[in-house]
Amino acid sequence: MRRLILLVALALIPGLSHGLSFVYDGFECIGDASPGTTKKQSRFEVIEEMGSGAYRILFTGGLPLFSSGAGPCVGTAFGVETTEASDGKQVKKTDAQAIAYFTGSHLIITLTTLNSYGDGQVFGGGLFMSSIVYPQTYTWIFEFVPETTSFKLIRNIAIMDTVSSIGSVESGKVMGTLTVNTPYTAVPGTAVEYYME
């Protein structure tokens, strides 16, 4: 019965899917996407139905992060706000919007975040380097499990970029940009399943 309600809500009745939420109970990330011992929840909620199986969703709590073979964890990799706090430090985002597409058997979610490190520096000889910016794009592919009315994560495709510029203080011109692009695909070592609330 819950499966029928979900399928009807997501696929057939416009507006009924708004407010549906799904939760994964995991552990907070420590270090580089390794699970710690503190429990942490990742949640996504449908905030807008865009038509033809597409939805705008809101992630809160954290994102499922893992590398192949490592257990999953919930990390707060939402990026930073575009505005700074009064002390000049960057403000970490507490949520992130994403786009989802539901085929009836699979859910595909794509999310892009932006992180930044450092304030930039001026070196001897009149050279400067901007802060290092990390745009990251995640695409998660979930399989719908009708028996439990849940979505099981089967693959994470991510692209991690690193961008920084070097220029001259004297001329005010950028002389070069450093860009490193690192795509990867990972499969969770243990199950990551989001259950309908």
Image (cartoon, helix red, strand yellow):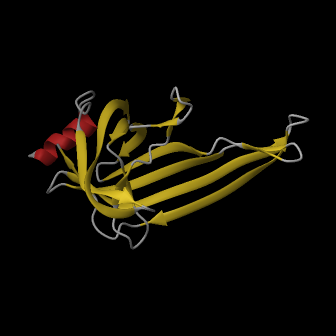
Q: Which percent across, then down, holds residue 18?
A: 26, 30
At 14% from the left edge and 44% from the top edge, which residue is drawn? Answer: 4
Rendered-image quadrant of the C terminus: top left
161 sits left or right of 53 in the view = right
Task: Tell which of 167 and 11 is nearer to you.
Answer: 167
At 29% from the left edge and 37% from the top edge, which residue is drawn? Answer: 45
Q: Which percent across, then down, holds residue 94?
A: 38, 37
Task: Tell which of 90 and 197 is nearer to you.
Answer: 90
At 45% from the left edge and 46% from the top edge, which residue is drawn? Answer: 110
**Do we see residue 108 in this rendering?**
yes
The answer to which quarter of the image holds residue 65 is: bottom left
Task: Tell which of 19 and 80 is nearer to you.
Answer: 80
Looking at the image, residue 74 lies above or below residue 67: above
Q: Residue furthest left?
A: 1
Q: Which percent across, then down, holds residue 37?
A: 26, 62
At 34% from the left edge and 31% from the top edge, which residue is drawn? Answer: 49
**Do we see residue 151 in this rendering?**
no
Q: Which percent across, then down, holds residue 128?
A: 79, 43
Q: Residue furthest bottom?
A: 69
Q: How many marks?
A: 0
Task: Tell which of 177 and 103 is nearer to you.
Answer: 177
